[in-house]
Image (tube, rainbow, N blue to C red):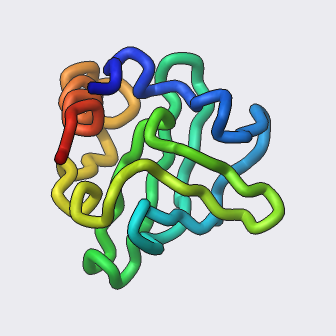
Amino acid sequence: MTCVTHMWSYNPESHYTPGTSLVGFKVDASDGHIGKVDEATEEVGSSYIVVDTGPWIFGKHVLLPAGTVVRVDMKEETINVSLTKDQIKESPEYVEDKHRGDAAYRDQLGQYYGRDHS
């Protein structure tokens, strides 16, 4: 199980360069393309990306903690995440007005993404 406290920080092996805007980057799950980054933060201990899934999940937005980012390809402007399409599709609903300050909502997301889905 991934430690929930590290779920909100970019993995050093992801090749993410602090200060780089990820907005507009394509996002690929472990089993295919899921959308593009609509919003991204690099706040210490609370970093995330918000992905617009477009028609794939009928325009749904999903919030993915930075700890799910496996690799950032700056040249190709692509982000690879450690989750499958189904894991992302079944994720807790993205609630735009809660994701910035609601600790319980953050905990819910961290617990979902931090657990073993196999």
Quarter of the rendering containing residue 13? top right
Q: Is residue 116 left or right of residue 81?
A: left
Q: Residue at x 48, y 52 (%)?
A: 81
Which quadrant would residue 64 be assigned to in this image? top left
Residue 89 pos. (x, y %): 23, 63
Residue 52 is situated, as x and y percent measured from the top left of the image, at 43, 66
Q: Is residue 77 left or right of residue 79?
A: right
Q: Is residue 92 left or right of residue 97?
A: left
| 102 up-or-down from 85: above or below | above
Front residue of 4/95: it is 4
Q: For the N terminus, which image quadrant? A: top left
Q: Is residue 57 above or below residue 14?
A: below
Instruction: Using the image as rendered, state which of residue 4 and residue 47 is in the foreground.
Output: 4
Task: Give coordinates of residue 34: x percent, y percent.
Answer: 42, 70
Of all residues shown, which one is farthest toward the bottom?
Answer: 55
Q: Residue at x 45, y 59 (%)?
A: 51
Residue placed at 42% from the left, 48% from the top? 82
